[in-house]
Structures are given as C-alpha cells and as structure tokens.
Image (spheres, rainbow, N blue to C red):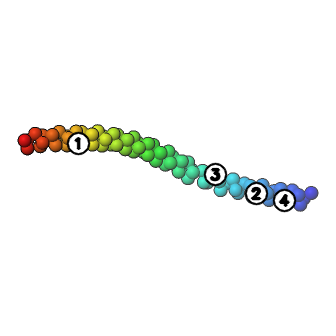
Amino acid sequence: QLLSFQEQNQSLKSLNSELSRLLNLLPDTEELLSQIEQQKTRIEQLENENQQWQELTQKLNNENSLLQKQNSELLTLNSR
C-alpha cells in the first residue's frame, strides 16, 4: 500500500510539473492570440482597401476607354 501511495504521489508530482509548464506557456499563448487577432483585423482592413482600389481602377479604366473613343472620333472628324 505504501508503494501504491508513492506511485500516486509520483504521478501527482509529474502532473503538477506538467501543469506548471503549461501555465507558464499560457501568457505566451495569450500574446500570440492577441497578435493573431490584430493581424486578422489588419488583413480585413487591407482587403477592404484593396476592394476600393479595384473599384477605382475599374472606374478609371472605363473613363479612359470612353476618352479614347472620344479622342478617336475627334481625330476622325479632324481629318476630314
């Protein structure tokens, strides 16, 4: 019975040691989670900005096409 108690005691010490190790990792894990959340927010902001730039690019391309067409028409009229 004493042996069983010693084995249990050793198991508890081992578990306690593992728990202490994990608890020491917790602040680092929380910091990493915080950084991940910040990066996620930044990625969302960049995706929104990218979408706005794409919309602006499309708008400018459309305007440019229209101006090119008008320019071509003016050149045609001017050459007559």
Label 2 Cα crowd, 10 Å radius (few <14 / some 14-19 / many 20+): few
| Sequence-first disc among 1 and 4 | 4
Q: Residue 7 has which mark?
A: 4
Q: Residues within 10 Å of mark 4 (few under 14, many from 20)?
A: few
Q: Residue at 85% across / 59% down in the picture?
A: 6
Q: Earlier in the sequence, mark 1 or mark 2?
A: 2
Q: Residue at x 37, y 44 (%)?
A: 50
> What secondary structure is marked by label 2?
helix
Given the image, on which type of amino acid does mark 4 rest? Answer: Glu
Viewed as shown, does residue 70 lie left or right of 24? Answer: left
Which residue matches tag 2?
13
Separation of disc 1 and disc 3 at Cα?
A: 61 Å
80 shown above or below 1:
above
Check if mark 3's residue and mark 4's residue have beta carbons within 8 Å.
no
Which mark, residue 56?
none
Q: Amino acid at mark 2?
A: Lys
Label number found at residue 23: 3
Amino acid type at circle 1 is Asn
Nearer to me, 31 or 16: 31
Q: Amino acid at mark 3?
A: Leu
**What is the x, y in percent for residue 66?**
22, 39
What SS does tag 4 mark? helix
Query: Looking at this view, is 11 or 63 the one in front?
Result: 63
Q: Quadrant of residue 53?
A: top left
Spatial CA span between label 3 and label 4: 24 Å
Q: Are marks 3 and 2 in contact (CB under 8 Å)?
A: no
